[in-house]
Amino acid sequence: MTAVAQAPCEQHRPGPGARAAARLCGKVPVIDTRRLQLRGPRVYDFKAFAKIYESDRSIEMGGPFTREEAWQEFTNYTALWLLHGHGLWTIDALTSPSAGFVLLGYEWEDPEAELGIFLTEEAEGHGYAEEALDAAMGFAFDTLKWDSVVSYVAPDNDRCLKLMNRVGATRDPVAEALVDADTHVYRHKAKAGSL
């Protein structure tokens, strides 16, 4: 397999800047679940992020993307922590660091914040997506005090549609009317007493 050439912005650069970045990353809330840790993204997580975005795994998100486009998405989602107090977490599993990513974030065209999830191929099939979504929803409802959050799902993404049902989300026709006709919008609501 040919090694992918890294752009200078992808490479770890030791020194005061890297130490400042580590201190900032330490401000992103860390969530520990039974088998996972959700933590702030670090530059070396981009390798796993790009692997997802450059592959057919990203078709349901409008991909595959170029590595540069993947970098733009990664930095956008990471910057949301500074702008909105929520954003992208890296999912570390017991046996698989950088197993995927869970997001409370925005795309430019999103009418409201979304809850998104994407895993590496190796991490699928272990129940990590449901566990990470539950943890991110807990943060949205208990810490941010949101009453709901949506997930945007392509109608032919069977795995994600099943996941939405497992986590108790319901389709929201009012929210669907505000987005692309080829997108299902699933609403996750805070449980009574969690606010």
Image (spheres, rainbow, N blue to C red):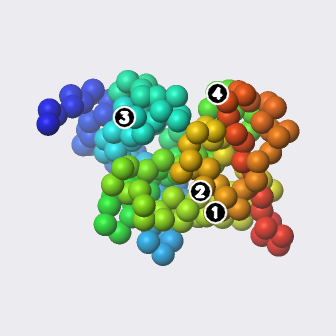
Real-space CA distance between mark 2 and mark 1, rounded to the nearest whole angstrom: 5 Å
Q: Nearer the viewer, residue 97 or 75?
A: 97
Give the amino acid at mark 1: Arg
Circle 2: is it few (<14), some (14-19), or many (20+) Cα within 10 Å? some
Are circles 2 and 1 on residues that touch, CB within 8 Å? yes
Task: Report the residue that reaches farthest toward the bottom.
Answer: 34
Q: Nearer the viewer, residue 169 or 79?
A: 169
Q: Which mark is residue 166?
A: 1
N-term-proximal mark, 3 vs 2: 3
Image position of 70 (left or right of 122): right
Real-space CA distance between mark 4 and mark 2, rounded to the nearest whole angstrom: 25 Å
Image position of 79 (left or right of 43): right
Q: Position of residue 69 (x, y in %)?
A: 43, 25
Q: Which residue is mark 3?
A: 55
Circle 4: is it few (<14), some (14-19), or many (20+) Cα within 10 Å? few
Q: Position of residue 78 (x, y in %)?
A: 50, 41
Real-space CA distance between mark 3 and mark 1, rounded to the nearest whole angstrom: 26 Å
Are circles 1 and 4 on residues that touch, CB within 8 Å? no
Tag 4 secondary structure: loop
Tag 3 secondary structure: loop
Q: Nearer the viewer, mark 3 or mark 4?
A: 3
